[in-house]
Image (cartoon, grey):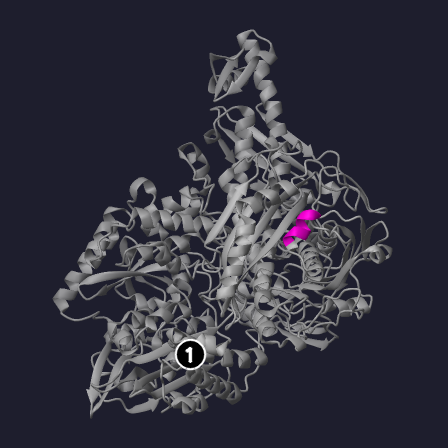
Amino acid sequence: MNTQHYALTAQDSTLISESLPNVLGTTQYIDDLPRPAGCLQAAVRLSDSAHAAIKAIRTNKAEALDPSVRVILAKDIPGTNQIGFNKPDEPLLPEVEWEYWGQPIALVIASSRALARRAAALIEIDSDALPVVTDPREAAAKGDFILPPRTIARGDASAAFARCAFVAEGRADSAGQEHVYLETQGALAQVIDGRRVHVISGTQGPTGVQRAIAQVLGVPMNMVEVEARRLGGAFGGKEDQATSWACLTAVASWLTGKPVELYLNRKDDMRATGKRHPYSTDFRIGADREGTLIAFEADYYQNSGSTCDLSPAILARTVLHSTGAYQIPNVRVTGYMCHTNLPSFTAFRGFGGPQAFFVIEAAMDALAQKMGIDPTELKRRNLFREGDETYYGMKLERVRALESVDRLLEKADYPALKSRIAAFNATHRLQKKGIGFIPVAFGISFTQLKMNEAGALVHIYGDGSVQVSTGVIEMGQQVSRKIALVVAKTLGVPVSLVTVQRTTTITVANTVPTAASTGADLNGMAAKVACEELRARLVRRASELLGSRDDEIDIRDSALFLKGKKTDLSWKKLVEEMLSARRDLSAHGYYATPFLEYDMKTERGRPFAYHVYGAALVEATVDLLRGTYVLDRATMVHDIGESIDLPADRGQVEGALAQGLGWALLEDLRFGADGKPLSDTLSTYKVPDVTFMPPDIDIEFLPPIENPSTPYNSKAVGEPPLQYGIAGYFAVLDAVRASKGEALAYYDLPFIPEKISAILAETPRESRNGVQGNARSPTPKAAPRGAH
Amino acid sequence: MPSVHIKVNGSWRTLNSSEGTPVLDVLRGELGLHSTKEGCREGDCGACAVLVGERMGDTVRYRAMPSCLLATGELREKHLLSLEGLVEGADGGLTPVMRAFLEENASQCGFCTPGFIIALTSWLAEPRIPDLAGALRAVDGNLCRCTGYAAIRRAAARLAKEFARLPLDPRERLRALVDAHVLPRSVAEYGDASIDAGAASGSGADVSGEAATGGAFIVGGGTDFYVRNPEPEEGFAPFITRMAPEFSRIREKSEGGQAWLDIGAAVSVSDFFASPEVQRAVPGIERFETTFASTLIRNLATVGGNIVNASPVADITSMLLALRARLAIVQRGHALPGTALERAPSRIVPLENFFLGYKKLDLKPGEVLAGIRIPLGGEAETARRFSFEKASKRKNLDIAAVNTAISFRLAEGRFIDVGVSLGGVAPVPMLCLLAMQALEGQICDPSNARRLAELAREAARAARDAVDPIGDVRGSAEYRRRMVHQLMLAHFVRLFESSGIAEELFP
């Protein structure tokens, strides 16, 4: 059924070369790098309770293990023991107390990793237990917030409910999600000439790491170089969460004068690092008799974990995506950043967006149940239209919501699909099929306006080959290929002449992390700006040589064209001519996304450069006997604008779908009431494998459309398709309903077999009913739930 | 400490690392080969997969295994292949599997890619017709967090098409794969050399005597041992049962009017399910193979190891319990090649009596589990009916919340030799005697769906009422109890599908 299967073709062979080291196994991740002479290995000692005051830390037994062992504690940090930048609440190592189970207390270095780990276990820590909070609503009840709550409102939502013919309310909870980047966190630090620090870090944000290292060492940023090579996956988990490991190795290297490597084992990584924020949300939604939405309210209790980290930015994305792809006139949404004794929850692909989409989709589902209509019809009726103004005051342009949805429903032959499923369900006792549908409108830009900028440095070498450096991190999203293509296209040379360099703070400075799906947009534009400048110089020189005007010259396919006619001047020759004439063959480009504005006081503005649209249908079959499900098919229509690199974009959509489906249905992040991590290995935390995914994945890309703020009308692709996984949740729910009627309403993700079987086992009378309309007034009963 | 002599990619090496060191550490440490990645150290991600070649009769066999759980001592005289070795001499510097990954864009961040390439190379080396289903099974122990597997499926489908006509004879198969550059020349060289050596010595791997007299600690496949002990002390040299050929055989035996299938404790789970003897004794058992771990693990894990690990939710143990298996225990001194199973075991223990408490075994110091005996019926026996069910979050490579197996025969229209096992509901894997009593001797009339449904309900209720599980991250107590009931019904639905039992159970 793959109607659009793009295989790479021969002319793409140079793009293939980007992946060549991967398939040969020669790509060097941090732990594969040749170790500098005398390199020490590090291990961390993690806390083994969720909240305690430190009384004493004894290191003598650890240090007695081997002469090479050295333990580094908070008191040893030469500069400021602080790496929190949104809020100074994150010491590199704790001095007074620790705030979650798995927090690094000490760094141990030794001649080998095994020794360091054994020594770490020998550190003795005396502490006094302190109270533990893991439930965000409990923290909220105590008023324990990371930062004050944030509300965005339009109209008068609470008054508008009185005008609604149908109102549904309920609760939707989503669990956290562990990134499971295959390469765990690590860093390799080295002091150079006794005064400068060079750190190779597995980070998405080298500048943030550079700034933090400078701070903990007490040196200016120009003494610190941070380099990042290809990461073995990141997905947001190495945006802020990579910083501490780089800082720890830098401190250790600074104190010993020796190179120090830290590569976390999986369990330490899963215990110590942050994950996607769990949310618990109350919602209320209302529509008129025709099913046109009138009002929506939501209170999001974000479980922020122990420190601020990126929680405010993640919450911003939640409250800016509260209505999903729907236009709603009266809206009031409030987000609470609840401080708990769990690892500091952090960026994960989608960045607060999926949590918001899950809530609005749950609300639409509840409302459709109330009205007794097909949720797909209700959703389609309320999609954003051209010129709509969002509840935060952004006028939408080039809206493609309806276009995506109608194309999807046509492609899937929706009415026929519905009757096929009904026929299946009528004839199958032990299995039921269901479908889930989600439309997506995802805003692109960092919600912190100042972050929407990037730089690039492009060199043309004397032989005509081109090298580009930007601030972007290659972590599997294949952004390097896109950057190379933008450079090649702008300069007019084949992509085989272009290489993309690893990212380091000494070539491009003050960069933003590779995040928010903006890596290719921002860095591609910066590279384009640099190339345009180079191209102008090259054209000037060519005009001099050919005796023409600049606007009569074109460079393409490594050749110079005069008034459309190919000349004898080749790219290589022109480059030589540039050198002879002493012209600069290097250029720095800078790009800042235009037209962004947002007023935090009024909560109005244009926070996004554009939106990415799309829609997905997922089909599932539930086994009623066992409470299990299989995913049969995912059909998507997605807006990538004018793709720079179609196979890369396709890979992003497919990969995001997998992570979304995993979050919605499978990945079960658990903590005990005492804050103990219960799913801290890959044997207890399961992510999608090859058999979990639907065998039939069909993606159709919408035709190109103008998109002026990106290179060549492309569109960001990393995060938007992750929301498609939410359709998997509703597909399973639809199948369960085929057996249990209107059962369920406390929307609780992931929808694991245990929850499915519990619903299937309920007799109708016992069924928990969290969706209630005006007629039934009691507030939803808080359902029993885990620690998320 | 005996040093280990193995062929690593293109050349023979004598390793300094000790026998108990995981192969992953030898590769990345002593050998400086970095294509093999550390992802989890518990066999759950496949990033560390390697190909292991060993002599099997008159040919050699290559299988993918997780190197983080593989003892170096296991590789004596075997052939270890990593990506560095696969590309030696490959056409244009790439093997066809690598090329398929490149051209289908199946590698994004690349960290999982070497493991996938190893697993798919192993799939092509299996002497079967390669199809997509087989390829997906081959990578059911490999995680990729970037691609969503779609591009990997496309690469596998391309390979299945490209290699549809590979010979099925194991020796010709390897030769064809070497010619096609899927496997390197070193495979052909290893095959020729080890078969010659085997012919000269006239016996199996002649290194086992040395291995069998090794360290005091006994390790089977290591797939449980190394999860608990990921970084063993330097010099660790266990006794590796897989290195003793006597521990790796499956044979039908009889004595004093009793017949049984003797399964060596070190038989790998893959070989167990593939065995014609096992399939004859337990018809249909092979369809439950993929419920156990992953292909990578099954290639390494042993049947005996699954038992002595004493997990309350061990899947193979659960199957063997229902089959009323008995264990042959030998004294350590007898555990020498060529003797262990020939000699009368010192004790025979019914499997259900082997578990004394949580992770506590009826196994004294000096005793070794040598084999597992599955009782066979007499000549007049009717076919055994068997079913296995497991509740877990993910279908593949996941540890069960609850598992259960059922086995019985039908004699003169009645249930006989009924065995019902339950895992995950008590500190030990157990037989469910109440469910067994509910069925034993009852009339089984496939045309009477109503009666069968009644029996199913009775057995399911009996099983549910018999258990008092605890809750943990894999499932609450309530869920486990519910699943015991549901999975018991599922056994009946599967085994009596054509009787219309589903309509009776779920009107």
Kind of residue sitting beneath label 1: Phe
Which is more toward the observer, A38 or B413?
Answer: B413
Question: What's the residue at 73%, 39% (across, down)?
Answer: A396
Q: Is residue B392 magenta?
A: no
- Magenta stretch, residue numbers: A376-382
Q: Is residue A26 left or right of residue A170?
A: left
- The residue that label 1 is drawn on is B492
- Residue A646 position (above or below residue A424): above
Q: Return the residue nearer the eye: A549 or B41.
A: A549
Residue A532 image-quadrant placement: top right
Task: Say which element carries label 1.
Answer: helix
Q: Residue at x 64, y 37 (%)?
A: A522
Q: Is residue A630 visible?
A: no
Residue B40 in the image: above or below residue B266? above
Q: Where is residue A614? Give x, y as percent.
A: 61, 45
> Horizontal and vertical percent for residue B407?
36, 82
Q: Residues within 10 Å of mark 1 (few under 14, many from 20)?
A: many
